[in-house]
Image (spheres, grey):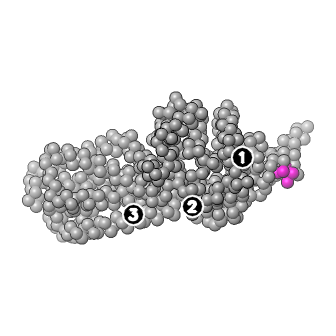
């Protein structure tokens, strides 16, 4: 199987001295729906930033579909679409311009940008808001626009950094339907989320990251087996050292 | 168009459209400010001063005002555009694209350059109608204006990258740039100043820029044209090299 994302011995140390990633190695195959789970500050976003050029690794290597993310960054970034955790839309742009400029940054011709942005605005129910500035959009619309922007240049690897944080149920389901569909069509997806049931339903494989290290990876049942517990949630609670919060323990206490 | 050309055009278009969307603030206000200077210093004060170095006083100050308009607009556009995008993290969309450090630097640089050129051209057009401004040495004037515009564009990029809050930009513009420009001989000839002010003025690099532009328009200068051009070209190239290095290393742009 072709490797979509290959991370080898990656270390990231910030100027403050904080070591956000410690010798991380990870491989995600082409076409996989891969989950990266871990508590806040575990290193999830740093890993994503190293893969997308928003952070410079201290050492180690990141390859995207065989392209080195540092030395061959142009080809590597061309294949990645990033929907970041924070809403980072440009205040000066409309929804349509947000997609159009993004397409331009990735070298898409005018006609192609026009057709693709029309398709995405329609797919994410933003057509009626196309000429409105991003500041006037609701939180859910901004979230949808960020996902549309990430997909604009037809990336082969889609990275979703907590894309459903703070969105309502129907939007969450709508987003997952769309992402599952493009995954089935061949797009590789890397997802970070705090919703374990989401990860369990969507991801074919999951990795736990904690303290800047990948501590376990496998399918959801494999992870439960690794920690000798019944579910992914219990495995996660073991990871963060909070097994007293397990629903099984809570039921026992209640009884 | 190649992918690289489309990318650069999109990056530049974004910078130009930003200031055009708020043109009352970015073009109208500086234009009005320049006219207030011409009215106060030219019409009111000028009626008492009559001539300076054999040149009508209003005509004497217009080249300096044109240069000042270009310099300040190029600087403030680039510094505020970069800082604002950094604060919103909207700049991540450009930074995670395949755009090279050189493409990013040139696009940010020319955004301010174009705004400065627009305000300076409008100032010149209007001043020409009101008082009639000659162009004695176009072959000196054009490179001088280009270099001045590009120098202050680079300075704006540098300050925008280094800045962490808008107060940093205000400090640079109000406490460093404005005094250097005002004390660089926009409104007077250095030879008229008593010592030590004449020498102090000659230590100000902006004095040589104003001298060049004034020579291009009016044929009058107090300093060597060739040396001034050489100094300006060298300073601009040095600043460009520093900024390129900052984009390459991702200083205060990437984590």
Instruction: Write down the chain letter for disc 1.
Output: A
**SS of the residue at dot 1?**
strand
Quote the CA–CA distance across marks 2 and 1. Answer: 25 Å
Instruction: Identify the secondary structure beneath mark 3.
Output: helix
Q: Nearer the viewer, residue A173 or A62?
A: A62
Give the mark nearer the N terminus: 2 vs 1. 1
Disc sitting over residue B240 in the figure: 3
The chain containing the residue under callout 3 comes to: B
Q: Would you say the residues marked 2 and 1 are in contact, meaning their CB atoms lie under 8 Å apart?
A: no
Q: For the point 31% across and 44% down, which residue is it?
A: B27
Q: Position of residue A15 (x, y in %)?
A: 58, 64
Looking at the rendered structure, the secondary structure element under dot 2 is loop
Circle 2 sits on which residue? A72
**Residue A224 lies in magenta, yes or no?**
yes
Give the foreground label among 2 and 1.
Answer: 2
First to last magenta residue range: A222-226
The residue positioned 25% from the left and 60% from the top of the image is: B144
Residue B77 appears left or right of B136? right
Work out how far the residue at label 3 is from the one at label 1, CA to CA, in angstroms: 44 Å
Closer to the eye: label 3 or 1: 1
Residue, far front = B1
Q: Residues within 10 Å of mark 1 (few under 14, many from 20)?
A: many
**Closer to the camera: disc 2 or disc 3?**
2
* Residue that numbered label 1 is attached to: A33
Work out whether residue B146 can be spotted: yes
The quarter of the rendered structure image containing the C terminus of chain A is: top right
Tell me the chain of label 2. A
Q: Measuring from the top left, give residue B5's x and y in whole percent.
A: 44, 52
Decide if residue A57 is on the left or right side of residue B203: right
Question: Closest to the observer: A153 or B251?
Answer: A153
| Above or below, comparing residue B157 to residue A233 in the picture | below
* Residue B149 versus residue B222 in the image, above or below: above
């Amino acid at each position: 199987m072709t490797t979509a994302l290959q991370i080898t011995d990656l270390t990231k140390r910030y100027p403050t001295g904080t070591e956000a990633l410690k010798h991380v190695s990870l491989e995600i195959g082409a076409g996989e729906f891969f989950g990266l789970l871990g508590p806040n500050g575990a290193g999830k976003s740093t890993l994503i930033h190293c893969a997308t050029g928003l952070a410079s690794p201290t050492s180690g290597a990141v390859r995207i579909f065989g392209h080195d993310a540092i030395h061959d960054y142009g080809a590597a970034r061309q294949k990645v679409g990033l929907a970041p955790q924070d809403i980072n839309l440009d205040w000066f742009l409309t929804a349509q311009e947000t997609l159009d400029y993004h397409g331009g940054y990735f070298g898409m011709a005018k006609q192609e940008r026009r057709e693709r942005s029309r398709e995405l605005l329609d797919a994410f129910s933003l057509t009626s808001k196309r000429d409105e500035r991003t500041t006037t959009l609701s939180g859910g619309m901004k979230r949808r626009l960020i996902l549309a922007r990430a997909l604009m240049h037809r990336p082969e690897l889609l990275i979703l950094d907590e894309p459903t944080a703070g969105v309502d149920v129907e939007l969450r389901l709508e987003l997952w339907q769309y992402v599952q569909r493009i995954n089935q069509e061949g797009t590789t997806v890397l997802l970070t989320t705090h919703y374990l049931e989401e990860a369990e339903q969507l991801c074919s494989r999951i990795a736990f990251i904690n303290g800047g290290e990948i501590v376990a990876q496998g399918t959801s049942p494999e992870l439960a087996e690794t920690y000798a517990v019944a579910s992914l949630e219990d495995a996660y609670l073991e990871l963060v050292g909070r097994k007293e919060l397990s629903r099984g323990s809570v039921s026992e206490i209640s009884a | 168009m190649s992918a690289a050309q489309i990318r650069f055009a999109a990056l530049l278009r974004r910078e130009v459209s930003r200031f055009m969307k708020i043109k009352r603030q970015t073009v109208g206000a500086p234009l009005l400010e320049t006219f207030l200077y011409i009215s106060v210093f030219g019409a009111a004060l000028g009626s008492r001063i009559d001539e300076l170095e054999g040149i009508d006083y209003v005509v004497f100050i217009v080249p300096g005002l044109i240069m000042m308009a270009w310099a300040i607009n190029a600087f403030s556009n680039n510094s505020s555009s970069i800082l604002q995008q950094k604060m919103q993290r909207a700049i991540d969309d450009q930074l995670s694209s395949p755009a090279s450090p050189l493409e990013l630097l040139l696009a940010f640089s020319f955004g301010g350059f174009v705004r400065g050129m627009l305000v300076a051209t409008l100032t010149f057009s209007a001043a020409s109608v009101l008082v009639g401004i000659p162009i004695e040495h176009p072959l000196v004037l054009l490179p001088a204006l280009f270099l001045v515009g590009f120098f202050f564009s680079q300075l704006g990029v540098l300050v925008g990258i280094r800045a962490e809050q808008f107060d940093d930009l205000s400090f640079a513009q109000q406490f460093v740039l404005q005094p250097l420009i005002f004390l660089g001989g926009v409104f007077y000839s250095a030879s008229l100043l008593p010592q030590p002010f004449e020498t102090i003025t000659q230590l100000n690099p902006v004095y040589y820029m104003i001298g060049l532009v004034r020579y291009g328009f009016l044929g009058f200068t107090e300093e060597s044209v060739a040396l001034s051009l050489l100094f300006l070209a060298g300073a601009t190239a040095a600043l460009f090299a520093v900024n390129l290095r900052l984009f390459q290393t991702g200083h205060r742009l990437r984590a």
